[in-house]
Image (spheres, grey):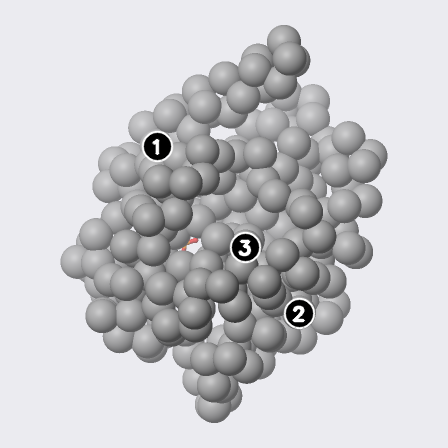
Amino acid sequence: MFITFEGLDSSGKSTQAELTSRKLTDSGEKVVFLREPGGTRLGEQIRSILLDVNSNIEPVAEVFLFSAARAQLVREVIQPSLARGEIVICDRFVDSTTTYQGYGRGIPPGDIRAINRLAIDDILPDLTFFIDISLDEIEKRQRNAGKIIDRMERSGRKFFERTRNGYFELSRTEKRLHIINGERSPQKIFNEIWLIIQQEVHRTSVE
Ligand code: ADP
């Protein structure tokens, strides 16, 4: 099974991805926990370029960098892990490119679809959790945590409004994508996620 977590930065994605990973591991599953961009040596190198506030990156160059990291991760780690029957959990995946580089940066949808298809080699998640919180709540969390803001996070409020809207648009066509209200306690959010995972496990085992 392949599970991904999506949402804007500071929405609580990583917190939920970690809770899911721990619970599945405790249930005796072999879990591979990954983050994008990253998860491979090449991916981590690309990550440092993408997040560096001193990097000057054109939107088209940005989409190729994220996709290059993803293409490597799919082939080097995700495909072999799934083939061994392991559960793969990824903090961000292909939907981030559709929303951030497509809706956010304005790369045309047809181009995004073509690049995504090439990068993922038909590997799509079984389940995707979009952890949604308001932009005001994000700003509050970042202030409270005294967070150092990376290059992507400096893209401005309008950019994040378009990106967030992109996730809602995507959820209309992608049945695997579940919108999760992220403005609740981590445990409440996780209970909802765990229920959906159990339903998916049940659905696939009776098919
Ligand atoms: P992301 O991976 O989306 O950037 P994190 O999981 O790292 O988000 O969480 C961002 C910040 O918000 C952290 O300081 C974390 O402790 C806090 N946080 C996570 N989940 C919640 C929640 N449900 N309610 C309030 N704060 C949260």
Label 2 Cα crowd, 10 Å radius (few <14 / some 14-19 / many 20+): some
- Residue 185 left/right relative to 197: left
Mark 2 or 1, nearer chain start: 2
Amino acid type at mark 2: Ala
Amino acid type at mark 3: Val
Residue 36 appears at what percent x and percent y? Answer: 57, 59
Query: In this orientation, does residue 89 appear?
Result: no
Considering the image in quadrants, where does the N terminus appear? top right
Looking at this rendering, what residue extends furthest in the left direction? 136
Say which of marks 2 and 1 sits in front.
Answer: 2
Ligand 1 neighbours mark 3 (CB distance < 8 Å): no
Tell me the distance, in whole angstroms, between the alpha carbons under discs 3 and 1. 23 Å
What is the count of numbered marks? 3
Q: Which residue is mark 3?
A: 94
Q: Nearer the viewer, residue 131 or 65?
A: 65
Q: Secondary structure at mark 1?
A: helix
Residue 117 appears at what percent x and percent y? Answer: 63, 56
Mark 3 or 1, nearer chain start: 3
Q: Residue 75: which disc?
A: none
- Residue 207 left/right relative to 180: right
Looking at this rendering, what residue extends furthest in the top direction? 206
Quadrant for residue 116, please give it.
bottom right
Q: Nearer the viewer, residue 178 or 173?
A: 173
- Residue 140 left/right relative to 38: left
Residue 185 appears at what percent x and percent y? Answer: 28, 35
Residue at 60%, 74% (x, y): give it. 65
Looking at this rendering, what residue extends furthest in the front direction? 110
